[in-house]
Amino acid sequence: MKFLFIAFIGVHIPLIVLIMAVVFDWIPLKGWNVILVALAATLIATGLTLLLLKSLLWPILQAKNALQDYTRKKVIPSLPVHYTDEAGQLLQQVQIAIDSMDALLKERKDILTLLSHDLRTPFTQLIGLGELLQSEKSEELSAKYGAIIQKMAEEQLIFIKDIIQILETGKEDEISHVFEARNIADILSLSIDMQQLSAVRKQIQLSVHPVPAIQVKCNSRLLSQAISNIIGNAIKFSHRGGEVIVKIHVFSGHIHLLVADKGIGFDTGKAALLFQKFTSEGKMGTDGEVSSGVGLYLTRKVIQNHGGMIAAFSEGKNQGAVFTIQLPIAN
């Protein structure tokens, strides 16, 4: 409406000026005077109209520049969103669209990071278990390692099928948010199996306390991988021949999973930094194991998506560490 009003006034200013000149007898309108007055009024009206239109087009130009900066440089704009007219609503929608797109792209990047992390770790463990199986002479241990390999391979096959479905449909939410009631003992058993090789190689004793028969509503693959990451970190940062303790308590409608080690620990007060993406607090393991810097970040995201919480505690360097995971019990 503003554009139409300004255009209407701009077109009719010369006519209005001529009428007022005649009515109020400002100047004698004869011959060339009429043409000169009309021309002057037209030029002034055109200039004023262009200035007003430029001010009205400013939000549109801002929106255009914001979109260009984001598409070319991935710069998130800070557009003024306090205006209430049509142009202000346009700026609001552009800001919301860019923020939503950026959040979606970051979520996609996190998913790709999770996929690469989840694929690399189990296959490395499968290779190690295969090597261990070839050199193992005990039939009992060979059967145990074979069962672990089969279980991990089945889980990875399901995982790969999920990836294919995500790539075909683009609906990762339908995969990652499918929750069902599962016994926490089964989830924990799978998580520990994933880290058996690491424990054997470093002669780490995995002390698992009796697990209560409690169910949690979860995506079993994601939750078992998250718990496995915590146990794997405890092994990674434990000294050779050490011990990792895993126990579960039930309290106030939640399970509390505790994973404790006596390894290198971390500085008190830096626990929150451990869960940041590509954290600077990432360290090499006691046997030179490499840290990706995203394992705990992804683990926290998975736990939070399950309605839970994760926390880390340590009394300082070389004082060990304790990680706790809290999850609601399935109704």
Image (spheres, helix red, strand yellow):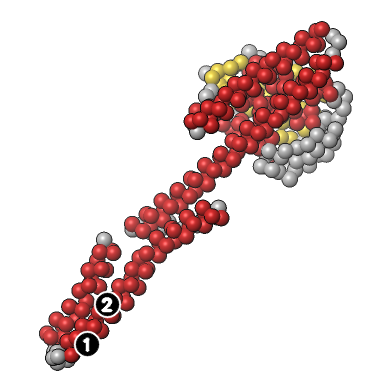
Residue found 74% across the figure and 27% down from its top: 124
Instruction: Check the picture and name the quadrant holding the N terminus.
Output: bottom left
Give the residue at mark 2: 45
Q: Which residue is mark 1?
A: 36
Q: Can residue 102 be spotted in the picture?
A: yes
Question: Could you say which is closer to the camera, residue 215 or residue 276?
Answer: 276
Q: Dot 2: few (<14), some (14–19), or many (≥20) neighbours within 10 Å?
A: some
> Residue 275: x percent and y percent?
68, 39
The furthest residue to the left: 23
* Marks 2 and 1, the one that precedes in the sequence: 1
- Residue 126 in percent (x, y) is at 74, 22
Number of numbered discs on residues:
2
Q: Is residue 20 above or below residue 181?
A: below
Q: Quadrant of residue 222?
A: top right
Tell me which residue sits at (14%, 90%) in the image. 31
Amino acid type, label 1: Leu
**Is residue 245 in view?**
no
Task: Measure the alpha-carbon separation of dots 2 and 1.
Answer: 14 Å
Disc 2 is placed on an element classified as helix
